[in-house]
Each structure stands twice: as structure tokens, then as C-alpha cells.
Image: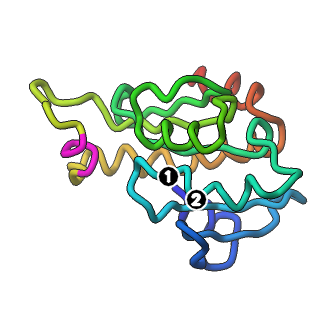
Amino acid sequence: MSDHLARRWQLPPFRRVPAARECQGVVDGRAVALVKPLTYMNRSGMALAPYLAQPEFDPAAHLLILVDDFALATGRFRLRGAGSPGGHNGLKSIEATLGRSDYARLRIGIGPLPPGTRNTADFVLGAFEPPEREALDALLDPMAEAVECWLAEGIEVAMNRYNAR
């Protein structure tokens, strides 16, 4: 999704920064940074450390985390303004780094888990079947529109507009 947004917004190439790859630019007059952690999932929060050092950075207003979610069906997504990590190790790491849970997230469905799945990591790290890949590809533009809505109008408007679909 980050690559899709970077292309859509005509941002410069991603570059290496501490614990991540990042590209920055301006979208509709707003400064944006797309960040792709290079750490293990359970250490994703490390990629946010440079932003926490900026006094104007407010996670509740300036942060939208995109995350996979096997509790949502493949081909669905859901915006949330805050919440618990829900067992997601990446969100646990982010919450530990931020010291708070009031940041927006866009949960991207990759579920449901197949019956009898014991190791969720194997499922999450596995390849998508062609119909799943097609369903996820079809979400790219609607999710990009939801991200743009969040940028322009905030999480409440974006949730009301895109979670009802």
C-alpha cells in the first residue's frame, strides 16, 4: 500500500532511514511521510522514534498505521481512531514506543484464518492465492481514497465515509 500511495502522490523514491525506508513529500498542501519499517514485526515501533523527537508530532493527529488483520475478511478494510493492539505484535510495539493507543489505523483484511491454523505467523507470512491477491489489489484505490480523506478531514470523517462500505 505504501508503494501505491507513493506512486499515486508522485513522491520521490523511498530512502533508508533508521529502522525503516521512508519517502516524504507534500499532498494537497500537507507534508507527508510514508514509512516502511525494516525491523521484525514485533519491533515496528522503532521506526517511529525519529518522529517522537519532533515536538510538533502528535500521534493522535499525525499518524495512520496500515496493518494486516486476519480477523477481517480478505477484500475488506476498516479505519479506527484508537484501540487495543488486538494481539497484533506490530501494534503492540507501536503502542509501547508511543506510550499510548490513540493513533489511527487502517486494518487491511487478510482473513479468515483457515480452520485448524495453529501458527498465525505462517499464515500471515504466506503467499496469497490469486483470488486473494486480486481482492487486495482491488482495495488499493479505495484505501488510498480513505487515507486521503483522513489526511484532509480527519479520522472521524474517514471512518464514517469508508467503514460503512
Q: Amino acid at mark 1?
A: Ser
Quarter of the figure with the C terminus: top right
Q: Does the segment drawn in magenta span residue 124?
A: yes
Q: Is residue 54 left or right of residue 51?
A: right
Instruction: Name the residue at 70% across, 65% down.
Output: 9
Q: Is residue 153 left or right of residue 122?
A: right
Instruction: Name the residue at 36% across, 43% down.
Output: 135
How many discs appear? 2
Mark sitting on residue 44: 1
Callout 1 touching callout 2 (CB < 8 Å)? yes
Mark sitting on residue 52: none
Give the residue number, with chain letter if any, for mark 2. Answer: 47
Instruction: Name the residue at 49% across, 29% down.
Output: 85
* Residue 25 image-quadrant placement: bottom right
Instruction: Name the residue at 55% across, 59% down.
Output: 2
Magenta residue span: 121-125
- Measured along the vertical axis of the image, is residue 50 above or below residue 141? below
* Residue 64 image-quadrant placement: top right
Give the percent coordinates (x, y) of residue 148.
Answer: 73, 47
* Residue 95 image-quadrant placement: top right
Give the alpha-carbon distance from disc 1 to disc 2, as whole Å: 6 Å
